[in-house]
């Protein structure tokens, strides 16, 4: 288990920066799936979110670690009642944390006040691997302050399991947002269980029928089980949100303020017409 201990000791932020550096270069060299409008500006906005994300993480992650340590010390949760081997604990831990995040994500699309923050992530009209960081700091706080703590409290997950989850989650999220062409057969194999980049791009489609689908970060299995799985070919996806489709609404400062501005969802009619036709 020395290798695992070593991996868990690496700051997850470094892994994310390393992955983005690799994918950013690949996106520059290889032919991309979606064309960039102004990549420099796009990267600058994502970069500002990245700085806020890392600075916020120092605090939010600290609060989360403190809360989970307290739960662990008091042996709260299901895993403390049964004796499981470490490998099984790690696999079940990832599945349960991903399941909890799936429901948090579904809620973010359903509850208007959380959607106001979550839509910052969806507003991106040209996506690349740095888009993973495009999340409102208050949304990141909501998630850190609820999902891992609640999951740890119910299931008895310890910090090792949570660390391992982040180790698996981060490459998935960077890959899912990368602007590269992925073969369609991925959906027919890997995509039966895992969220592929093309399946996550469908979640970023402007049409709300598709925006409200494919919520899972790692296991698309949850969408298949709970009836939110949807498919359309990646070349038919139009990224972003119609109500944010203006250059002035794509800047860091506008996006940070946007949850406090009343902006109507403009794709509601599409959902109604889809229901009528299906
Ligand atoms: Zn979403
Ligand atoms: Zn996304």
Image (cartoon, rainbow, N blue to C red):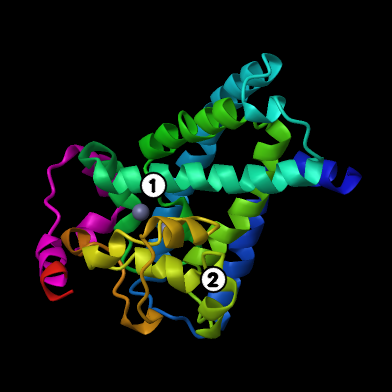
Q: Is residue 13 visible?
A: no
Q: Is residue 259 magenta?
A: yes
Residue 38 located left or right of residue 262: right
Residue 12 located left or right of residue 234: right
Of pointers 1 and 2, the one earlier in the residue sequence: 1
Residue under label 1, please give it.
105
- For image coordinates 24% across by 47% down, the residue present is 254
Q: Which image quarter has ligand 2?
A: bottom left
Residue 157 located left or right of residue 41: right
- For image coordinates 50% across by 46% down, the residue present is 99
Q: Is mark 1 within 8 Å of ligand 1?
A: yes
Find residue 72 and report its horizontal and vertical position in percent.
Answer: 68, 21
Task: For marks 1 and 2, give the CA distance.
Answer: 20 Å
Q: Is residue 11 magenta?
A: no
Residue under label 2, please give it.
192
Q: Is residue 85 visible?
A: yes
Q: Nearer the viewer, residue 65 or 40?
A: 65
């Amino acid at each position: 288990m020395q290798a695992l201990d070593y991996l868990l000791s690496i700051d997850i932020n470094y892994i994310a920066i390393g992955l983005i550096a690799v994918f950013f270069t690949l996106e520059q060299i290889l032919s991309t799936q979606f064309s960039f409008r102004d990549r420099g500006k796009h990267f600058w906005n994502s970069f500002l979110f990245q700085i806020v994300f890392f600075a916020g993480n120092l605090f939010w992650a600290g609060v989360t670690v403190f809360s989970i340590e307290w739960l662990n010390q008091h042996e709260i949760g299901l895993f403390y009642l049964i004796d499981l081997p470490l490998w099984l604990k790690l696999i079940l831990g990832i599945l349960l944390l991903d399941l909890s995040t799936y429901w948090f994500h579904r809620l973010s699309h359903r509850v208007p006040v959380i959607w106001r923050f979550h839509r910052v992530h969806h507003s991106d009209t040209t996506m690349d691997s740095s888009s993973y960081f495009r999340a409102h700091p208050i949304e990141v706080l909501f998630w850190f302050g609820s999902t891992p703590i609640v999951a740890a409290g119910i299931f008895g997950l310890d910090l090792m399991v949570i660390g391992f989850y982040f180790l698996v989650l981060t490459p998935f999220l960077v890959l899912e947002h990368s602007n590269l062409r992925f073969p369609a057969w991925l959906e027919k194999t890997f995509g039966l269980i895992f969220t592929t980049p093309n399946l996550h791009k469908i979640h970023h489609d402007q049409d709300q029928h598709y925006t409200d689908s494919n919520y899972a970060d790692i296991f698309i299995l949850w969408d298949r089980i709970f009836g939110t799985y949807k498919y359309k070919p990646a070349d038919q996806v139009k990224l972003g949100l119609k109500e944010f489709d203006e250059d002035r609404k794509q800047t860091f400062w506008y996006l940070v303020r946007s949850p406090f501005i009343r902006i109507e969802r403009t794709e509601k009619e599409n959902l109604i017409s889809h229901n009528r036709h299906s």
